[in-house]
Image (cartoon, rainbow, N blue to C red):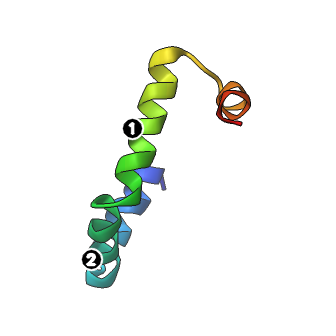
C-alpha cells in the first residue's frame, strides 16, 4: 500500500477525517509554508536549522 492509499483509507474514518481537517486549518499550513520556502531557497534541513538558531 502506498502512502497516498493509506491516507485515503484512513480518511474514510469520520473521526480521522475531522482531525485531519482541524489540523489542515492550523499547524500543517505553517509547515507547508516552511517547506516551500526551504525548497525555493534550496536550503537543506541542516542548513535551515543552522540559520534558524
Residue at x 55% of width, y 15% of height = 42
Instruction: In this rendered view, identify the residue nearer to me: 41 or 21.
Output: 41
Q: Nearer the viewer, residue 53 or 13?
A: 53
Residue 49: which quarter of the image?
top right
Q: Earlier in the sequence, mark 2 or mark 1?
A: 2
Q: How many marks?
A: 2
Q: CA–CA distance between discs 2 and 1?
A: 22 Å
Q: Residues within 10 Å of mark 2 (few under 14, many from 20)?
A: few
* Left or right of 29 in this view: 34: right
Name the residue tied to disc 1: 33
Q: Position of residue 38 (x, y in %)?
A: 52, 26
Assign the C terminus to one quadrant of the image: top right
Q: Position of residue 25 (x, y in %)?
A: 27, 61
Q: Tell me what residue is drawn at x 46 percent, y 37 percent.
A: 34
Question: Which residue is the extreme one toward the front?
Answer: 53
SS category of the residue bearing label 1: helix
At 48% from the left edge and 35% from the top edge, which residue is drawn? 35
From the image, tell me which residue sits under label 2.
Answer: 18
Q: Quadrant of residue 36?
A: top left
Q: Position of residue 27 (x, y in %)?
A: 41, 58
Neighbor class of circle 1 (other Cα within 10 Å; few <14, some 14-19, many 20+) is few
Q: Nearer the viewer, residue 32 or 8?
A: 32
Question: Which element is circle 2 on?
Answer: helix
Q: Is residue 9 above or below residue 29?
A: below
Q: Is residue 5 above or below residue 23?
A: above
Outermost residue toward the bottom in this view = 15
Residue 21 vertical placement versus 49 (above, below) = below
Image spot of residue 45 (x, y percent): 66, 31
Amino acid at each position: 500500500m502506498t502512502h497516498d492509499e493509506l491516507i485515503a483509507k484512513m480518511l474514510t474514518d469520520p473521526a480521522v477525517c475531522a482531525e485531519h481537517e482541524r489540523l489542515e486549518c492550523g499547524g500543517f499550513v505553517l509547515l507547508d509554508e516552511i517547506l516551500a520556502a526551504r525548497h525555493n531557497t534550496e536550503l537543506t534541513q541542516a542548513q535551515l536549522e543552522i540559520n534558524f538558531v
